[in-house]
Amino acid sequence: MLACALPAGPARADVKAGVDAWSDGDYDAAVREWKPLARKGDPDAQFNLAQAYKMGRGVPMDAEKAKELYGKAAAHGHLQAADIYGLMLFQHGERERAMPYIKASAERGDPRAQYILGLAHFNGDLAEKDWVRAYALVSLAREAGLPQATRALQQMDTYIPLEDRQKSVILSTRLAAEAQATRERLSATAELGTPENGPAATAPKVAAAPAKSPEIVSAERAVAEAARVAGSDSPATAGADYARPKTPPAVASRPATKPAPAAPAPQLKPKPSPETASGPWRVQLGAFGVAGNADALWSKVQNRPELAGHGKLLVPAGRLTKLQAGGFASKVAADAACAHLSAGGFACIAVRD
């Protein structure tokens, strides 16, 4: 996706002329429009020219030049550029420098950044060790459709206690709401023409890394996974929205980079988790005239993190059988689990036993 933000003016017209040329497949003409504007510091032109260098359209493919231009656009507050720049820094081994961008992108709801930041919080290397936040962030990435997040959660289940996984359900709901509020604020700011400080101007220094916990995904593999979902727009989807989007652009797939060798098996033995949770609240997943249908639904949901440690309950109700999962300590916890289950396509309601 290319960019051409408001307000209108001569420079905006030239940026849009380049976007129109790009959409028509005339990449050389698009680049001619954007180069002088990029040199003058126009963030949309810098971003669009970075896209051209990244894909080799109208200019030779040059990842380093693309990264440089993404960085310049990000410094001027271009959020799409900041998202990509952070991923490229991380991919190229500049991880401490990348993390402020990754954190800011995660706060805006970018699933790629949420995945990387979640791993950092789990490993305790590039962010403080916080297993509740780690599980919450990777869960949000999983809900956005990143397949590697599902694999990471399965490995996290081996180490993170049940109590922390349950806390993460509530935290992930709050983080998702905060990300939505941030996107709405940034959208309103863009519409009003009020500049936002770019991440480069306000990025905090990364604190010294604490002692490492078992790394479920090595840094190199995290780089490969991030690169695989970093999103290079194809010519078919490279035409611009004339104004900045109100929600983050859809993640476009790119060819998988060759993953680095897997990390050695973790040395830390998994902590035992309680077998079942306790509490007066339940989530009800449905009521069935055929009990076997309740069993079939349970087989689909029983391994979801929201239901970890919560036992299956089949409750007779006349001719129906209610499928419930019990042991939630509060209505807030049950509602949070239902919100995540519903986002995954499984409707449910919170009930008290």
Image (cartoon, rainbow, N blue to C red):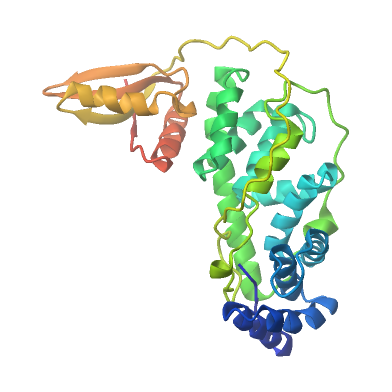
Q: Is residue 28 above or below residue 177?
A: below
Q: Residue furthest left?
A: 319
Is residue 197 shown to the viewer in this render?
A: no
Q: Nearer the viewer, residue 69 or 59?
A: 59
Task: State which quarter of the image contains the C terminus.
Answer: top left
Rendered location of residue 130, percent (x, y): 70, 28
Rendered location of residue 85, percent (x, y): 75, 56
Q: Is residue 24 above or below residue 149?
A: below
Task: State which quarter of the image contains the N terminus.
Answer: bottom right
Rendered location of residue 109, percent (x, y): 60, 50
Query: For the point 72% across and 63% down, which residue is it?
Result: 54
Q: Nearer the viewer, residue 155 or 164?
A: 155
Rendered location of residue 128, percent (x, y): 77, 31
* Left/right of residue 352 with respect to residue 60 in the rendered view: left
Query: For the point 67% across and 78% down, which residue is it?
Result: 27
Q: Residue furthest bottom?
A: 10
What is the quadrant of residue 59 in the picture? bottom right
* Left/right of residue 139 with respect to residue 29 in the rendered view: left
Is residue 88 shown to the viewer in this render?
A: yes
Query: For the point 60% across and 36% down, which residue is it?
Result: 138
What is the quadrant of residue 158 in the picture? top right
The image shows a total of numbered marks equal to 0
Query: For the point 64% across and 33% down, which residue is it?
Result: 133
